[in-house]
Image (spheres, rainbow, N blue to C red):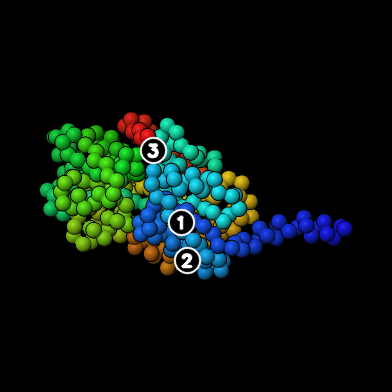
């Protein structure tokens, strides 16, 4: 009897230590082929090679990541359904929307995989050649110039609001439901922030001109493009990709997830792919990620409040 009880008591720990023992579902709040989807699949491939278990990406786009976050929050807390998301979910949405079907406390942060610089771009045929040109023209013609974004309250909108506020200028916002860069190229709108993954190929193809990057320093993918902070000291407007698990996920499972994720981020080939997209590898601890999330949320909450950004 004692032996049987001992075996039963040790079974959960053994099962947890064997994680993963079956395929892992990764919910991504964006369509297939977008930056978060592409990088999530790269991570998933390496995770599968290391563990022998498949990673199945489930694309749940729409509603500023809300649909995907709700699905992940309602999943069983066993480590077999995870959320791969960006800053909107926890750093922007809670301040833009009056009601959300999830809250930050529904999740456990595992690790921030990378930082995503935005690139401020204009048409290659535009007369605007520098950020200083843009600020000068916007000051001369308040609200006449336009900027595009992926929608009200999206990262590309809120980052631009932060830039305009710090520069002391105003422009007219043109939110899009689909990809907006073609209208920037065609000069239907003057400028836009786009994630480095989308902007860099267009810059290198000569279709758009990069005016600045939102990271604190220049990025390897565009070494000749200044950081916006060189013109507006202290400006940072990056997004990020991170992995979250539903609240209640066992600690051994979280520890395994973290260890495997940090191994992936440390791989030279994986890092090279990220840097080729203009992304900055991170792979920080859960404690560091929690601290970062707090600072990130405070910064974006102020921008949202100052600019009265709201969405239903």
Q: Position of residue 106 (x, y in %)?
A: 54, 42
Residue 100 visible, this angle: yes
Mark 2 vs 1: CB contact within 8 A: no
Mark 2 nearby-residue class (10 Å; few <14, some 14–19, many ≥20) = some
Q: Is residue 113 visible?
A: no
Q: CA distance from mark 2 to mark 3?
A: 32 Å
> How far across and down, in percent of the image, does residue 207 sit?
18, 57
At x 70%, y 60%, the residue is 14
Split into 4 quadrants, where in the image is the N terminus? bottom right
Residue at 28 percent across and 49 percent down: it is 178
Q: Which residue is tagged 2?
A: 45
SS for dot 3? helix
User: Earlier along the polypeptide chain: callout 2 or callout 3?
Assistant: 2
Residue under pointer 1: 58
Query: How packed is label 1: few (under 14 Cα within 10 Å), some, or many (20 or more)?
Result: some
Residues at badges 3 and 1 in contact (C-beta under 8 Å)?
Answer: no
Do the CB atoms of the residues marked 2 and 3 lie less than 8 Å apart? no
> Tag 2, which secondary structure?
helix
Disc 3/disc 1 C-alpha distance (Å): 28 Å
In this image, 44 relative to 233: left or right? right
Q: What is the total number of numbered labels drawn onto the structure image?
A: 3
Return the disc, 2 or 1, that comes first in the chain's sequence: 2
Q: Which residue is mark 3?
A: 300
């Amino acid at each position: 009897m004692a032996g049987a009880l001992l075996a039963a008591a040790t079974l959960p720990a053994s099962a947890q230590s064997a994680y993963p023992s079956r395929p892992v579902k990764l919910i991504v709040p964006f369509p297939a082929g977008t930056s978060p989807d592409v990088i999530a699949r790269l991570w998933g491939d390496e995770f599968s090679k290391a563990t022998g278990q498949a990673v199945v990406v489930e694309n749940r786009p729409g509603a500023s990541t809300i649909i995907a976050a709700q699905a992940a929050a309602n999943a069983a807390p066993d480590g077999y359904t995870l959320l791969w998301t960006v800053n909107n979910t926890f750093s922007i949405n809670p301040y833009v929307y009056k009601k959300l079907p999830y809250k930050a406390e529904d999740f456990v942060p595992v690790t921030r995989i990378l930082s995503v610089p935005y690139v401020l771009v204009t048409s290659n045929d535009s007369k605007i050649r520098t950020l200083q040109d843009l600020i000068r023209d916007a000051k001369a013609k308040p609200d006449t110039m336009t900027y595009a974004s992926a929608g009200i309250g999206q990262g590309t909108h809120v980052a631009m609001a932060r830039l305009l506020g710090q520069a002391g200028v105003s422009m007219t916002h043109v939110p899009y439901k689909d990809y907006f860069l073609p209208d920037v190229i065609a000069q239907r709108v003057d400028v836009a922030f786009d994630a480095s993954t989308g902007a860099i190929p267009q810059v290198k193809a000569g279709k758009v001109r990069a005016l600045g990057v939102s990271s604190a320093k220049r990025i390897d993918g565009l070494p000749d493009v200044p950081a916006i902070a060189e013109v507006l000291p202290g400006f940072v407007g990056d997004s990020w990709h991170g992995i979250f698990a539903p609240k209640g996920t066992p600690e051994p499972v979280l520890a395994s997830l973290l260890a495997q994720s940090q191994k992936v981020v440390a791989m030279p080939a994986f890092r090279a792919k990220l840097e080729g997209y203009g992304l900055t590898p991170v792979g920080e601890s859960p404690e560091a990620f929690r601290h970062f999330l707090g600072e990130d949320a405070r910064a974006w909450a102020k921008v949202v409040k100052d600019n009265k950004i709201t969405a239903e």
